[in-house]
Amino acid sequence: MKVFKTKSELKQHLLGLKTNDKSVGFVPTMGALHQGHLSLIKHAKKKNDFIVVSIFVNPTQFDNKEDLEKYPNTLDKDISLLKTVSCDVLYAPNGNDVYDNNIVSQNFNFDGLEHQMEGKFRDGHFNGVGTVVKKLLEIVEPDKAYFGEKDFQQLQIIKKLVKKHNLPIKIKGRPIFREEDGLAMSSRNTRLTKGHRESAPFIYKTLKRAKIKFGTKSVDKIPKWVVKEFKKHPLLELEYFTIADEKTLQTATKIEKNQKYRGFIAVFAGEIRLIDNIRF
């Protein structure tokens, strides 16, 4: 596996691959890799000749400075894990290399996708996501880029970004990778206290129970039920739960035929914010 710290060296290396008509798959990450990341990379590896993984903790998508400062940095361990899945290239830059010494967000219009759910609670988050993903896609110029569905809203926004900016890249989503107890894998999970980690599977259990109620109860009653369930749980604080249209991400007020819906949730386990979703 080759490791590059600068985009100029990375681009020079990739140029040789592309002139030989080799397909390039790209998996952008913020490091602190887990089995969910590795499953994404292994899938991408089957679909492309070469795989590029990036590890970059993007400062512009953090609305909470303390969250940025505490984000896990495990580069040496990450490199060892990437070697186990035969990653071809790692791009591990600093902020100035990605942002050309000007670490600020662009402003984007994602046709309203950015104002739903996470956008209501994390000011400027999706401008930061859009900025860094656009920069990384323009640096790597992959044929396909892969993202996990745990950040489903982000996935839809990235698809919109690629379409609006006419980037010749296919964006592929992959199912959420879960722990044995159902907790969605996340780099943040390592920061959970023992008590919060033991409590966290309640999030997925509640999503599954809400799914069962979907279609038998009116769509406005299910969020109220979820709120009541979390009020019974002392270690978990519900930030939001919503049932939304997969395409528009707008909250469902009634169920339409031939539409796809998901339940989306954000929960605080102590200081750690966890998100999850499930198709209804």
Image (cartoon, helix red, strand yellow):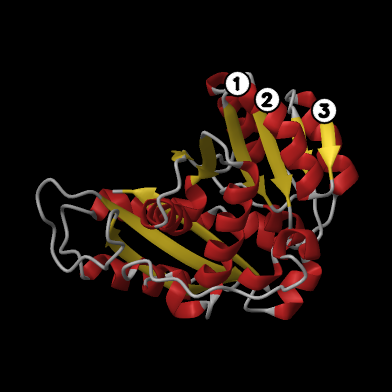
**Around disc 2, counting alpha carbons within 10 Å, would you say few (fewer than 14), some (14 to 19), or many (20 or more)?**
some
Picture residue at 61% right of the left edge, 20% below the top: 49
Q: Earlier in the sequence, mark 3 or mark 2?
A: 3
| Residue 1 - label | 3
User: The disc labelled 1 sits on which kind of residue?
Assistant: Lys
User: In this rendering, is residue 183 above or below 188?
Assistant: above
Looking at the image, residue 168 sits to the left or right of residue 259; the answer is right
Would you identify the image quadrant in which residue 156 lies? bottom left
* Residues marked 1 and 2 touching at CB (< 8 Å): yes
Picture residue at 63% right of the left edge, 18% below the top: 20
| Residue 147 location (% of width, % of height) | 53, 44
- Front label number (1 vs 3): 1
User: The disc labelled 3 sits on which kind of residue?
Assistant: Met
- Residue behind mark 2: 17
User: In this rendering, is residue 114 above or below 98?
Assistant: below
In this orientation, does residue 178 appear? yes
**For the residue labelled by badge 3, is the local secondary structure a helix, a strand or a loop?**
loop
| Residue 190 location (% of width, % of height) | 75, 55
Which of 127/248 is in front?
Answer: 127
- Residue behind mark 1: 22
**Distance of label 3 from label 2 (alpha carbons):** 14 Å
